[in-house]
Amino acid sequence: MTETKFTPAPWTLDEDGEILDCNNDSIALLEIEDFDAEIEQELKANANLIATAPELYHLLSEMTGLLHEHHRSNYCSIGIEGELVKKSLTVLAKARGEHGQF
């Protein structure tokens, strides 16, 4: 697995919209108040997704590795498994900033 540079999990979201690391140090502060109820609900959902990003990254990385090993050990043609591995590797690289992101 490629080494990551982002702050390790777990991240949490507090009631003020601040995403904190395991030491309660701030990672990001999201403005999620003072909007109408529908927008505020969407912003809170976005904040929860951001807060789970490191765990999602590592889970996808582990699952991709297992799928890749299964794919190779069974001498499968590219098929759906190979396509899923390719897409997963692309998303993981994007999360690491390897595809022109920041």
Image (cartoon, helix red, strand yellow):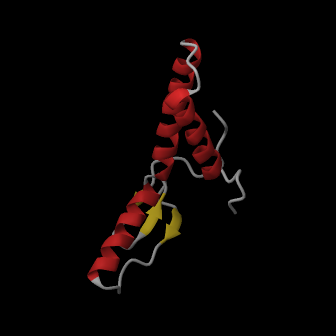
Please, is residue 16 above or below residue 55 in the view? below
Q: Residue at x 27, y 81 (%)?
A: 37
Please, is residue 99 above or below residue 1 in the view? below
Q: Residue at x 35, y 69 (%)?
A: 44
Residue furthest toward the left?
37
Please, is residue 29 above or below residue 54 in the view? below
Q: Residue 83's image quarter?
A: top right
Q: Residue 3's image quarter?
A: top right
Foreground pick, 13 / 66: 66
Residue furthest toward the top?
74
Residue 63 picture location, percent across and down: 48, 31
Q: Residue at x 53, y 27 (%)?
A: 79
Instruction: Specify the quadrant that holds the C terminus.
Output: bottom right
Residue 13 picture location, percent across and down: 39, 62
Q: Residue at x 53, y 32 (%)?
A: 64
Q: Residue 42's image quarter?
A: bottom left
**In the visual, does 54 lie left or right of 101?**
left
Instruction: Specify the quadrant that holds the N terminus.
Output: top right
